[in-house]
């Protein structure tokens, strides 16, 4: 199979490319960042999604397109750039794929198309109304609609994957990680909220800061720990390839989710003996974060099974840290 992977230099993209090459597929990697990958079956295209000539060249002769590239940001000053990448960029990739005669298009959407605070029911399945609460989630809703338009009008068989929060296991121990730092570590959480201009929340968090970093159990206003699904990059990459291969996948939308959500108190308890940091609890004002996706449809149609529980991710990260 000849496969184009956008976002080939990203966390999920890198792993997807490696797995495709390992099984003998020819891969074109498309990313704004250069890759040092060298392989007889790999070709790299360094460009962004506004470069329609580069996209046309990348799509030439491909059987399938895995559109994993996106800009993820919650900063107000990056919203315009994010919509250009995630909405206009997705439209450009779709158009190039349709013109090239691709027979499958896999789109990396996000669980943020659902309301992660106060969902109508739990666990959230693919029929839950799309009601994003973030501009990033909105950009993914618009991308999904473009995918279905091209499938309907331009006969481009497509699969939509709604990723749960995805990260490398090693990021769990990284106090400055983009994905885990502000979720579990006090100083990163303060820095994130300062970037958002959320002065009231910064003030509350700073009352917990005596200079030493801490692990934070974020809770709702009544003290119940937040909970959400956290998916290992290896599982997410496996789900992408399942969506590429499965005969019944086109026309469908799937949650790629771990078997259960992770409660933040349980997560911090696993991190505590490794990081050796003080643990504090923080009752956060505002809507409750109590979020869990249902992955039954992906199991039944794609044969997707999550192999990496949060506990196993932490153990793996600790083992790799010990090897260094």
Image (cartoon, grey):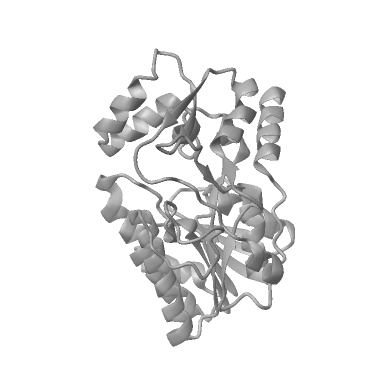
Report which quarter residue 323 is drawn in.
top right
Q: State the residue at coordinates (61%, 28%).
A: 269
Q: Is residue 1 visible?
A: no
Rendered position, 271 above or below 69: above
Foreground residue among 111 and 52: 111
In the image as oriented, which residue stretches furthest toward the front?
Answer: 222
Foreground residue among 167 and 133: 133
The answer to whether residue 221 is left or right of residue 34 is left
Q: State the residue at coordinates (50%, 78%).
A: 100
In the rendering, at what x and y percent does residue 205 appear?
36, 26
Locate the C terminus and report the quarter of the image it occupies.
top right
Q: Is residue 227 visible?
A: yes
Rendered position, 185 above or below 313: above
Q: State the residue at coordinates (61%, 48%).
A: 233
The answer to whether residue 234 is left or right of residue 105 is right
Foreground residue among 195 and 101: 195
Rendered position, 61 above or below 38: below
Foreground residue among 136 and 132: 132
Report which quarter residue 62 is drawn in.
bottom right
The answer to whether residue 39 is left or right of residue 23 is left
């Amino acid at each position: 199979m000849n496969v184009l992977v956008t976002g080939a230099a990203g966390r999920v993209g890198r792993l997807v490319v490696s797995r495709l090459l390992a099984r003998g597929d020819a891969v074109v990697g498309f990313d704004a960042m250069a890759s040092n990958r060298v392989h007889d079956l790999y070709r790299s295209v360094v460009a962004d999604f506004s470069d329609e000539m580069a996209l046309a060249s990348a799509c030439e002769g491909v059987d399938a397109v895995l559109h994993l590239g996106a800009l993820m940001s919650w900063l107000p000053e990056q919203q315009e750039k994010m919509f250009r990448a995630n909405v206009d960029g997705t439209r450009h990739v779709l158009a190039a794929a349709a013109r090239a005669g691709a027979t499958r298009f896999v789109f990396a959407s996000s669980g943020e198309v659902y309301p992660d605070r106060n969902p109508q029911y739990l666990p959230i399945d693919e029929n839950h109304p799309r009601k994003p609460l973030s501009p990033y989630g909105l950009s993914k809703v618009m991308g999904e609609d473009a995918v279905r338009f091209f499938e309907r009008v331009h006969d481009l068989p497509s699969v939509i994957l709604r990723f749960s929060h995805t990260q490398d296991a090693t990021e769990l121990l990284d106090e400055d990680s983009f994905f885990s730092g502000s979720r579990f570590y006090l100083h990163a959480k303060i820095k994130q909220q300062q970037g958002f201009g959320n002065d009231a929340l910064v003030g509350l968090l700073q009352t917990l800061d005596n200079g030493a970093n801490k692990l934070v159990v974020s809770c709702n206003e009544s003290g119940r720990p937040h909970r959400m699904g956290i998916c290992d990059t290896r599982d997410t990459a496996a789900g992408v390839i399942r969506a590429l291969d499965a005969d019944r996948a086109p026309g469908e939308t799937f949650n790629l989710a771990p078997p259960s959500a992770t409660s933040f108190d349980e997560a911090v308890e696993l991190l505590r003996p490794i990081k050796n940091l003080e643990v504090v609890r923080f009752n956060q004002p505002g809507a409750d974060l109590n979020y869990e996706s249902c992955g039954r449809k992906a199991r039944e149609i794609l044969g997707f099974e999550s192999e990496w529980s949060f506990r196993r991710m932490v153990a793996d990260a600790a083992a790799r840290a010990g090897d260094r």
